[in-house]
Image (tube, rainbow, N blue to C red):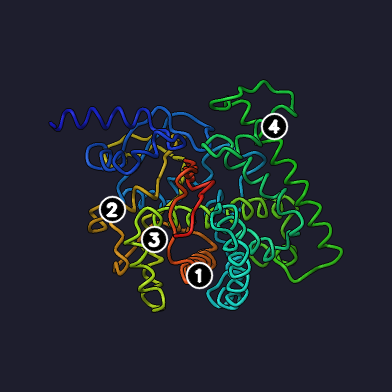
Amino acid sequence: MSDRKNLNRAVSVARGYDPYTSEWLEHEFESYALLREHLPVARTEQLAYRRQFNGGWLLTRYDDISACLSDTDVFSSQSSDYPQRPWIPQAIDPPSHTAYRRIMNKWFTPEAMTAMEPHLWDFAGELLDKMLQKDEFDFVADFADPFPTVIFCELFGFPLDDYEQLMDWKNTLMHATDGHSAGRALAVAKAKELGLQTPDEGELPSEVAGQVYGATAAALYEYFGGLLEQRREHARNDMISQLIASEYDGERPLTNEELLDTLFLMFMAGLDTVASAMGLIVKTFAEQPDKRREFIALMDDSQKLTLAVEELVRTHAIVLLPRRVTEEKEFEGASMHAGDQVMCPTMAGNRDPEQFENPDEIIYDRVPNRHMGFGHGPHRCLGIHLARRELRIGLQLLHQRMPDYELHPDKKPELFGGMKGASSLWLRKG
């Protein structure tokens, strides 16, 4: 095919870019590769982060994404509308971002997360005991969702009795419009509760989704407010209590709004990412038994296992990172204007052949492996050390206990787009 035809194809792909649809997911990596080669800084008419805006720029080369995520002066993290206020610290730029991160960094050090490992092993074992009593099961519902979510709730001090409600809020806020059937059903129910007209099938209108987000966020903020009041009266050994006792830049306590916005961000980040990545990894293992057996053969060697988990994160990156241009900027031949939106899909950067040899292949001993699966730049994932341990322990113990399995022949995996993952993954023991 001629370069002109490939360029035209790339222009068409960019114009219709919508990573929230099943159609996009079917050809995701092929489409990113086409854009990377022929239109690496692409103007797109339908760019949407949680469907909150239209139009912007789409980056697909590793170096371009790296440059964007590293330059917080030109590419701001306060990139879109938020149900209440910008989330702390994700949507805050340096130097304020640095001060907020400094408060929380000490809670997520490698040493602190290593101390949690015995509990991670025990809880993962408990979940697997229940799951493996059955010959077929939904891996997401029985393990991938509850394993990191319950650990996060324990860490922060969210009551475990509220697990179902917390999951409903999370799915409504994060998955109302991305192909997650439970998220959409919850959003439709909330819309009807609000008296909004909602179609029975298809996409939720953006104005309806916006009102649903706002109402759900308000309920969650009210819930967090109650937890803050409880901890002010009776402090506990949890992160909510530690957050209340913290000081911004060593000068003052955090305001109530800052506390609420920080809890909201930690909730949104902590209840979804590891579960999504683990679901996609296990789906790949079910579809590619040779790669599963290769993983099992190396996983008892701690050094090889560490490298393998990094490679699995690279090949199963889930995060779309939006940025907002703050000033006129010439970027790799593109004339960007203040207020323009820029989308940085880590799954595209992680498949760039200029950075990774044979990028579509899982190479467990890949070195170096400077992937973006945990983000990049100043806003790189705060919980990276916890996430790595959850993935390592969860995958290792699962395959010690159940080395052979397959996708259920009658229950197709349900995938969602955007900050992508699997909302249902039915497996059958081999």
Q: Quadrant of the N terminus?
A: top left
- Please give the residue where the numbered disc 1 appears in the rendered image: 401
Report helix, strand or loop for mark 4.
helix
Mark 2–mark 4 distance (CA, rounded to whole Å): 40 Å
Judge depth for marks 1 and 3 and give the one in front: 1
Report helix, strand or loop for mark 2.
loop
Total numbered labels placed on residues in the image: 4
- The amino acid sitting under disc 1 is Arg
- Please give the residue where the numbered disc 2 appears in the rendered image: 360
Does the residue at mark 2 contact the one at mark 3 (Cβ under 8 Å)? no
Residue 398 lies, with reference to residue 179, above or below; the image says below
Classify 10 Å Cα crowding around label 4: few (below 14), some (14-19), many (20 and above): some
Going from N to C along the chain, the mark reached first, 3 or 4, is 4
Mark 2–mark 3 distance (CA, rounded to whole Å): 11 Å
Going from N to C along the chain, the mark reached first, 1 or 2, is 2
- The amino acid sitting under disc 4 is Ala
Mark 1–mark 2 distance (CA, rounded to whole Å): 29 Å
Residue 94 lies, with reference to residue 341, above or below; the image says below
The furthest residue to the right: 233
Q: Identify the image quadrant of residue 118.
A: bottom right
The x and y percentages for residue 171 are 62, 43
Going from N to C along the chain, the mark reached first, 4 or 1, is 4
Judging depth in this view, the residue of 392 and 17 nearest the camera is: 392
- Please give the residue where the numbered disc 3 appears in the rendered image: 312
Mark 1–mark 3 distance (CA, rounded to whole Å): 20 Å
- Please give the residue where the numbered disc 4 appears in the rendered image: 189
Does the residue at mark 3 contact the one at mark 4 (Cβ under 8 Å)? no
Residue appearing at x 62%, y 31% in the figure: 210
Mark 3–mark 4 distance (CA, rounded to whole Å): 36 Å
Q: Quadrant of the C terminus?
A: bottom left
Mark 4–mark 1 distance (CA, rounded to whole Å): 39 Å
